[in-house]
Amino acid sequence: MPSGAAVPADPNVLHPMPGQTRVVLLKPLVTSPLIDVGDFSYYDDPDDPTAFETRNVLYHYGPERLVIGKYCALGEGVRFLMNGANHRMDGPSTFPFPIMGGSWSEHFDLISGLPGRGDTVVGNDVWFGYRSTVMPGVRIGHGAVIASGAVVVDDVPDYGIVGGNPAKLIRRRFSDEDVERLLELAWWDWPVEHLTEHVRAVMSGSVDELAAVAPR
């Protein structure tokens, strides 16, 4: 590589920040076939970020999948609740008697095959604030921001900012026209070498400036 050329970061390094073991890239970390994470999406936790699959993805018994796009930032304590947490609500009690054993286990059909909301899908470039929670089957659009402590029960639009419990749309980060342009530019799909050369435009430029440096 020529002297002075931009050197891309490595999406396959577990700890991308030297000396900061609290930050992990999720793609080289996860092992579950039910979890799919894109390049450079990271989780930050001062305790044990490498336990993400067991401490942050809960009740994940399948077959529903968790899909997280590229360049997502997950703050400490973010939780994804999966469909395995579901209980019956069509009878007098929601208590899952069959899992307690004994003769109750003969009625396991009462808790198998409960309706679910399908896969949980997160777009690219999504920022999750401290201890936010995502409920089963939610779809979060590209460029969204999830406020600290938010409990996301419904889908989030592209470039939407949501907060609260249950989370509500606060505003969108850009106009409808600019959102459409950003989705067409899809900078997260640019070759990492090109992205490295124009990272300032991606982080602090206008939509016009981003478009001006898009790959031809």
Image (tube, rainbow, N blue to C red):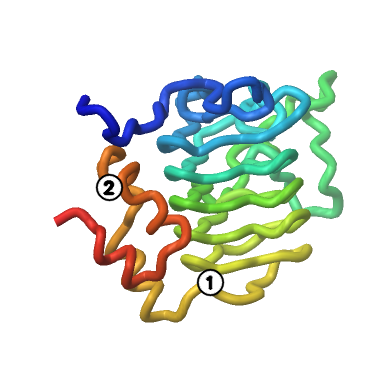
Q: Give the total number of marks visible in the rendering.
A: 2
Neighbour tally class for label 2: few under 14, some 14-19, many 20 plus, Cα within 10 Å: few
Work out whether residue 163 can be spotted: yes
Q: Measuring 42% from the left and 80% from the top, which residue is drawn there?
A: 176
* Residue 190 numbered mark, or none: 2
Q: Is residue 212 above or below residue 6?
A: below
Which residue is disc 1 drawn over? 173
Whether tag 1 and tag 2 are in contact, CB under 8 A, the answer is no
Q: Position of residue 115 (x, y in %)?
A: 59, 49
Tag 1 secondary structure: loop
Q: Quadrant of the N terminus?
A: top left
Residue nearer the viewer, 56 or 91:
56
Amino acid type at circle 2 is Trp
The residues tagged by marks 1 and 2 sit, at their Cα atoms, a distance apart of 22 Å
Task: Specify which label sits upstream in the sequence, 1 or 2.
Answer: 1
Q: Is residue 125 above or below residue 78?
A: below
Indicate the quadrant where residue 73 lies.
Answer: top right
- Asked whether, in this view, residue 177 is left or right of residue 34, the answer is left
Indicate the quadrant where residue 101 lies.
Answer: top right
